Structure formats: structure tokens, C-alpha cells
Amino acid sequence: MVKPSIPKGTRDFLPDEVNKRKFLFQTIEDVFRRYGYLPIETAAMENLSTLTGKYGDEGEKLLFKILNNGDYLAKADEKALRDRDSSRLLPTISKRGLRYDLTVPFARYVVMHQNDLQFPFKRFQIQPVWRADRPQKGRYQEFYQCDVDVVGSESLMYEAELVKIYDDVFTALGVEVIIKVNHRRVLMGIARAFGQLEQFNTFAAIIDKLDKIGEDGVKKELGHMGFSDEDCTRLFQCLNCPDISSLLALVDTNEDLDRGVEELRTFYEFFDLLDCNNEVVLDLTLARGLGYYTGCIFEVKAKNVEMGSIGGGGRYSNLTESFGLSNMPGVGISFGAERIFDVMESLGLFKDLHGLYVKIIFLAFDKDSHQYAFRHVSKLRSEGYAADMYPEPAKFKKQMKYASAQGYRYVVIVGSNELSAGKFTLRNMLSGEQHMCDLEEIVEILASK
């Protein structure tokens, strides 16, 4: 006998949870469509050549690799196998992997379908991704991302638009958030000021860990890069500046810093024209560890609950270049659906979905009543209404217990009296009220909901 289990970092969802998730996804999709973004889908698997070299050293370690079909050792590097050299062995036994995010597959998609798209191309995508991360609260190995990107334009209008999309979605969901903004070129300018530009990706990946390992942990890792204690003190002063003016007073200007500051100011020219319900702040500690970001970057944190980021993204200038297409800048953001779901559950923010998914069940007392009810259930379904029926004329208490447990809002009771009158007894499970009616009245009630 096999003990039932699922892989670590994955989850099953009960019907009520699935309904909540569908509500979450639909709310997000509605906002995406309102801003003119179009849906696409990509394959769960990508060639490893597509995925590697895009996520930095930390991200590369989290890729799920898929063994080649059949005898995957048939063409394995025998020396690498004997030497237990996984880096040399891997390319000979695995050529595919599960997608790590939706952005890199999107870049590949744009290159492959460039002749079928109109640019700027605005797309959204809601699909699962996989990461071999250590499972913990709010972190899973299989999870959904809800991405929205626009490629083919350098306009910083889109950065402001994407921040407003964050604001609209979380307002609609009732989740209070802080939307953090920074610019990778500003961080590059800081790295240049400390003589660390050549190691920028490592520098950014370390800074990105600030909220996880704190200043002491970051200071220790920066020490391995050559930062002295004095350097670290000055660096933290820079990163903790509340605004750009304070930063410029601490750091000598350079080309990277100038470019980043200029683009941030342009972003704010657009953003200041918008009305936002949530707090939007400049956070110079925000780094976004993925190596492909080159401009403005964003991250979202929920208020009133302990949870990691529930959204993030930014601008990338050359992601399609690795696939042979230059001059295709893009910017996008992602919603961490799993964490948003957990936040809403913990805060009790999901609405009563019974009103959104009206459900009605027919209960019958005997064989004739059961067949009569079955015929009218079919009529309701043909009219487009969700309707169910208990499979047999069992004891009424047993049928009612089932209807209550399943969360049906209305129960239609059919017995000999209803059968002879050609009507039904309709019970509202929320109020407990019931009355005799015909099918047309039932349709009117369902239509009003």
C-alpha cells in the first residue's frame, strides 16, 4: 500500500478554497483587461538553454531540471558521472526544465512570435511556476504567478501604469499594501561609488537579502566582496536615505546614478498625476535579486500581516537579446497569488462566495417525486443556472445535512404535495424561510442573484 502524500512545497485545495482562488484570479484578470492587456499562455516546460543564465547564481540553483526521456544515462558524460561532477553531468542527462517564472518564457515567446504581434505588446499571463526553494510560510515549490508586461516601449508612463495596476488590484481585494519603488541604475551608481560595479549582480543579490538576514548578515556577506566595516556603515547610510536628495548629498555623482535619478524623476512626473489608495514609497534598499532588471523596480508588501513580498517586478532592457532580438525593452510586474491567498485567508478578507456562485439543490421524498425533480433540474441547467440534485430519495434529514454541508443557498423540496400541485417548496438556507412556488419563480430568484 502506498501512503498518500504530495511533494513538499505543493498543496491540494478543497472546493471552497478553489472558489476563493478563482475569485482572486478573476479580480486580478479584470484589472489587467481594463488596462488593455491581452492573455497568453506558455508551456510548463522550457529548454534549459532558455532558462539558464537569466536568474543569477541564486536563481540558477532553484531550477527544476527534467531528466531526458528513456534511458537518460545512455548519453551521460561517464567521466563526470564517475567524478560526481553534477555541473558537467547535467547537460548530458537533462535538456529541459520547469519554468522558474513567467518573464523569461515571455521573452522567448516574443522573439518566436514577433511577426504576429503589434508593438508595444501588452500581455498578461496567469499560470503556475516551479522553484526548488526550501518550503516555509508563504513560500512553495509550485505556485501561481499573475504577470502583466509591456514590451516594445521605453516610455516610463508604463511604470506608473503598473504601479496603479497594483493599487487597483489590492484595493479591489481589500488588502492594504505598501508599494516600494527603486531603480537598478541608482543601485549601480552606489556600487560604482564603492568600486564594486564589476560585481554588481552579486552586490544586488546580497542587498536583496536585507529583509531576510538583516544588516549584520548583509555586512558579513559584503565583507567577502571586500567591503570594510567603514564601507558598510557608509553603504547603509546611503540605502536608508528617505529620498534622492539625501542620497545625492552622500554619494559622488556618476553616469549610472545620474541615469537612475533622471528616470525615477520621470516616473514620478507620471505617477503624481494618479490617485492611489495605497502607500507608494521610494526604498533604496530594494534590489530585486534577479539579474535581468535594468531600470525601475517594484515590490509589494502587505500591511497588518507577517508575510514576504506579495508582488514585484521592474524594467528589463535586453531580455530578448539572448534569444537574438535586440532593441526590445520591456517592463512588467507579478502578483504572488499563493501569498496573496494566504494573506487574505489570515485577514478574513474573502467574501461570502455563496452569493457569487449561486447554488441550488433539489431534494425528493419518493421515486415519483425524484423523477419529477430530475426533469426540472435539467430545465434549470438548460437555462444556464447551476443546479444539483440528491441522487436518491433518502431520509430528509440526511439530504438536508448534505445540502447544508455543501453550502447550498437554496433547497427545493419535492414530495407528494408538490407533485400533485405541480409546484415546489423553496427554502432559503440563510434565512430558513420557505414557501410554495412554481419553476418560473425559482428562475426569477436565481436571475436576481
Image (tube, helix red, strand yellow):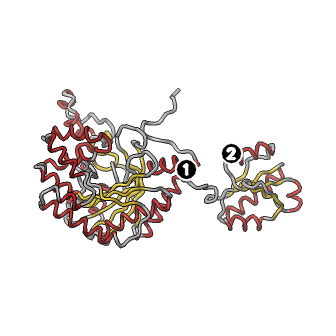
Mark in front: 1 vs 2? 1
Q: Is residue 241 left or right of residue 280?
A: left
- Between marks 1 and 2, how big is the CA–CA gap? 20 Å
Asked which secondary structure carries label 1, the reply is loop
Q: Position of residue 375 (x, y in %)?
A: 76, 59
Is residue 26 left or right of 400 when viewed as pictured?
A: left
Residue 239 x %, y %: 23, 51
Relative to residue 288, is residue 425 drawn left or right? right
Earlier-in-chain disc, 1 versus 2? 1
**Relative to 93, residue 21 above or below:** below
Residue 379, quarter of picture: bottom right
- The answer to which of 370 and 209 lies nearer the viewer is 209
Q: Position of residue 160 (x, y in %)?
A: 33, 67
Farthest residue to the left: give it: 195
Crowdedness near tag 2: few (<14), some (14–19) or many (≥20) residues, C-alpha within 10 Å: few
| Residue topped by disc 1 | 348
Residue 360 in sight in this render: yes
- Amino acid on which disc 2 is placed: Ala
- Residue at image coords 41%, 38%: 136
Q: Nearer the viewer, residue 186 or 100?
A: 186
